[in-house]
Image (cartoon, helix red, strand yellow):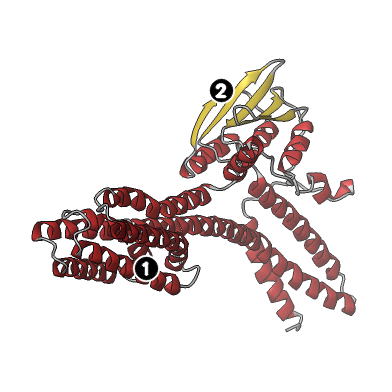
Amino acid sequence: MIRWGRHKQRKWQQRSKLEQVEVSTRWMLLLTPWIYFVGGMPQFLVQVDDQQSAKTLSGVVVVLAVVQCVLGVRGLPRGIDFYLGLGEAPRRLLAAATVTFALTTAVVTVLVARDWVGDAAEPAMALFAGVPSVTGVYGLVVSRRRSAAVTAGGCLFVCCLFAAAGMAWPSLLGTLFVLGLGGLVGIFSPRCSAWYLAVMRELDEAKEAQSRLAVAEERLRFSRDLHDVMGRNLSVIALKSELATQLARRGSESALAHMEEVQRLARQSQSEVRAVVRGYRETGLETELAGARAVLRAAGVDCRIESAELELSPGAQSALGWVVREGATNVLRHAEASHCAIRLMAGAADTAVLIMENDGLRPEPTPGGSGLTGLSERLAALDGALTAERDEAARLFRLRAEVPLSRGHRAVPPVGEPDAGVLADTDADTETDTDTDTDAHARAHADVGETAGSVRGEGLE
């Protein structure tokens, strides 16, 4: 039994917050018919006459009320699914519950006519026990106004039956109040719960759409930057190579000069692409700390940052920035955290230590993923280290990164980006300066115009 309970607890903790809210809401609605049954049926039974016939009819009322509760338990989840657009309306269950309620009303009317039940609101309490099973499902499949109007008409019809059976008008007023209150609560309680679930689903979908749009926007930005860098130079290279080909066929010595210009433009384009990639993948520690705090707080996680002013090399800042980014991603994806603390401090032996700690640790670690492995390799290249600890008792996850404070370490290229030496030419005499001239764009436009004029001058149009 204890093992079963722990298994259920682990499964519950592995659910997302939206799933937890939805499951708890559905279970609460399933308990609603039984709550009404327990609240109304005992008050009815204590007022039934001691005659055998009266007890038999009261037993029939109890059985019919239990049947109504069972039909309500089966119909409410399907009604919520219909409201959320996930299924069809439970019309058969609703029809069965309506028929059962009508039979209950008929039996109670006989008890009132025979004067076998109290002449107050006790007959209404018997119907109160089964009203939510009908109105709850009905309120989920039709509009609010229609469900309220039909419920009000049903309450008036029951009161007319009781009046015809001989119930006094003060008791009729009490019956109308009890049935009206039970019917309206039975309508709007499930409907409000279903509306809450619909709003939360829309917010969750909007959050996912926002994330996808942010990724798409970043991709567009990078593609625009790459196009701005490569578009002009490639146009010049294409025109000059075409011109050099034609001149070489004619035996002109100027073809060599044009090919040297093509080589220069190719190296310049290589340097510019490398600069774009580095700027795109470069990670700043302060920027990542601010971004992590904003993202986590937007997700409902209380994020506290304690940052000391340390002398860090650009490579160390970039590596720690990637640790913050990966740690924040893990908090959002692999934990149900409510608090997260990020501390940057000086460690022993001239080192900087970054610690990220969050609660909401799930019982079982999520398999797969290579984010922490990539971070370990990045820090190892800086003579640093990365450790990840799970505190199962306190449900805490702790990520600790350590890098030296001393400078002179080689900057580590981001994971998936080749080192600068890979992009550079292998021959020493072909190395070029990575800094581009300030008038590179103007020179590119001039080269395009000059080359196009040369092509027209050579008759290559």
Nearer to me, 103 or 320 = 103
Check the image and report above or below for 148 versus 369.
Answer: below
**Drawn side of residue 405 relative to residue 242, left or right:** left
Quadrant (top left/top right/bottom left/bottom right) for the C terminus: bottom right
**Quarter of the image where one finds residue 109:** bottom left
**Drawn side of residue 419 relative to residue 58, left or right:** right
Nearer to me, 459 or 297 = 297
Secondary structure beneath label 1: helix
What amino acid type should be assigned to the residue bearing mark 1?
A: Thr
**Quarter of the image where one finds residue 96:** bottom left
**Drawn side of residue 431 relative to residue 71, left or right:** right
* Mark nearer the N terminus (1 vs 2): 1
How far, Cα to Cα, is label 1 from label 2?
A: 71 Å
- Circles 1, 2 touching at the beta carbon (< 8 Å): no
- Decide if residue 185 is in sight here: no
What amino acid type should be assigned to the residue bearing mark 2?
A: Ala
Q: Position of residue 305 (x, y in %)?
A: 52, 29
Frontmost of labels 1 and 2 is 1
Q: Position of residue 110 (x, y in %)?
A: 24, 66
Residue placed farthest to the front in the image? 52
Residue highlighted by disc 1:
100
Quadrant (top left/top right/bottom left/bottom right) for the N terminus: top right
**Drawn side of residue 23 relative to residue 399, left or right:** left
Residue placed farthest to the top in the image? 349
Check the image and report above or below for 190 versus 346.
Answer: below
Label 1 CA crowd tier, 10 Å (few <14, some 14–19, many 20+): many
Nearer to me, 75 or 319 = 75
Q: Position of residue 38 (x, y in %)?
A: 35, 48
Secondary structure beneath label 2: loop
Q: Position of residue 386 (x, y in %)?
A: 73, 30
Residue highlighted by disc 2:
308
Q: Residue at x 14, y 60 (%)?
A: 172
